[in-house]
Image (tube, grey):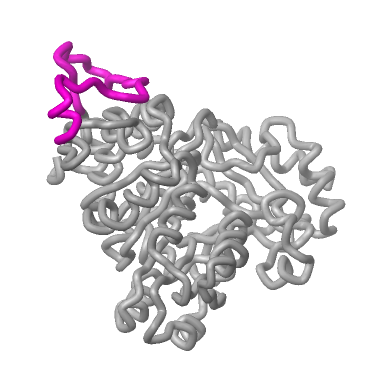
Amino acid sequence: MDTMKRRTRLVHAGGQRSRFGEVSEGMFLTQGYRYASAEQAEQRFKDCGDDEYIYSRYSNPTVRMFEERIASLEGAEDAFATASGMAAVNAALMSSLKTGDHIVSARALFGSCLYIVETVLPRFGIEVTMVDGTRLDEWEAAIRPDTKAIFFETISNPTLEVIDIAAVSGLARARNAQVFVDNVFATPVFQDSFDLGADVLIYSATKHIDGQGRCLGGVVLGTRSFIRDTLEPFLKHTGGALSPFNAWVMLKSMETLSLRCEAQARSAASLAASLADHPKLSRVIYPFAGNHPQHEVARRQMTAGGTVLSLELRGGKDAAFRFLNALELIIISNNLGDAKSLVTHPATTTHQRLSEEDRAVLGISGGLVRVSVGLEDPEDILDDLLRALTMA
């Protein structure tokens, strides 16, 4: 399967079949597993094999199929699925760091990621240095000989800054620091983060992987040693397990992941071009647009610009709210990667916890809105946006 193309792996990789020979993967909604004898139970707890199970907080056949499929897709040695994307971020970092360690993180992050980096890690005596992720000189100055980890979103939420993964990874590798990347916006379809130098890859499966707004989930990918020796013990004992039902939904969604993301990215690129010179907008942010500050990096790293664009309306929050409330097709919601087009106002939702000064540093103004482009006809999406802009 590893020699097959991406779309083939998305349909077939990681499949396990019961004695019934089902075509669609089975859903194993079970908490525990039967043992033929006390001796077998003892042996499993000593050394559980790849196709043996103890308890679904540890592992589950359906969850394992999801893990194997996405590991095959990304070219990772192994993966561990979690209850949500934030559970994945938290577990990846907390399992790897201890009191006295030092981590360097990009400043432009999703609000909950910022909370973990700025609030949770320091509570445990972990030193954090924040940098402008687009500035290699800041990374170079911040990474020390004792730095244990580097963390960033490959495309930041919501201002869509693009970080040069290969360059930052090179700086980290010179100091023996591990590179942890959240690749949600670039998706598994448009970017091969391991090839660019990442050590640990994190996804919120809630977004594009599910893609239809149904289930929460997350996944961490890396070497087998990292997944089994570092991450697995932490997750097994702290309980951030993915539900077998949610894993089954993710498995079925992955069959169409490439088709969905490619269609959504084409629409997003078209919308960004159509809105580029709109008089009501001071900025249209899209990674593949020629005026994006890191568009050359984006085109070097990615095969498409992604499914999300951000718009900054002239007139600030009042104009943004009038725009949002005038939309008829696009739904106001703080999720992304859905089959339905969604829009949110980051300053009052995902990043409302930040001070006005901190939001200004990140470029999150009152007029900024983030648009996740769905699978509707792009002409209908554009008509809705243009109609709402007349009300802004």
Please provide percent x and percent y for residue 256: 36, 32
**Residue farthest front in this picture:** 38
Residue 112 shown in magenta: no
Q: Residue at x 72, y 58 (%)?
A: 312
181 or 235: nearer the viewer? 235
Q: Residue at x 22, y 54 (%)?
A: 224
Quarter of the image containing the N terminus?
top left
Q: Quadrant of residue 53?
A: top left
Residue 31 shown in magenta: yes
Instruction: Determine whether 318 is above or below 300 in the image.
Output: above
Please provide percent x and percent y for residue 292: 55, 67
User: Is residue 255 shown to the viewer in this render?
Assistant: no
86 or 262: nearer the viewer? 86
Region rendered in magenta: 16-43
Instruction: Determine whether 339 is above or below 308 in the image.
Output: above
Q: Residue at x 50, y 31 (%)?
A: 215
Q: Main secondary structure of the magenta part?
A: loop
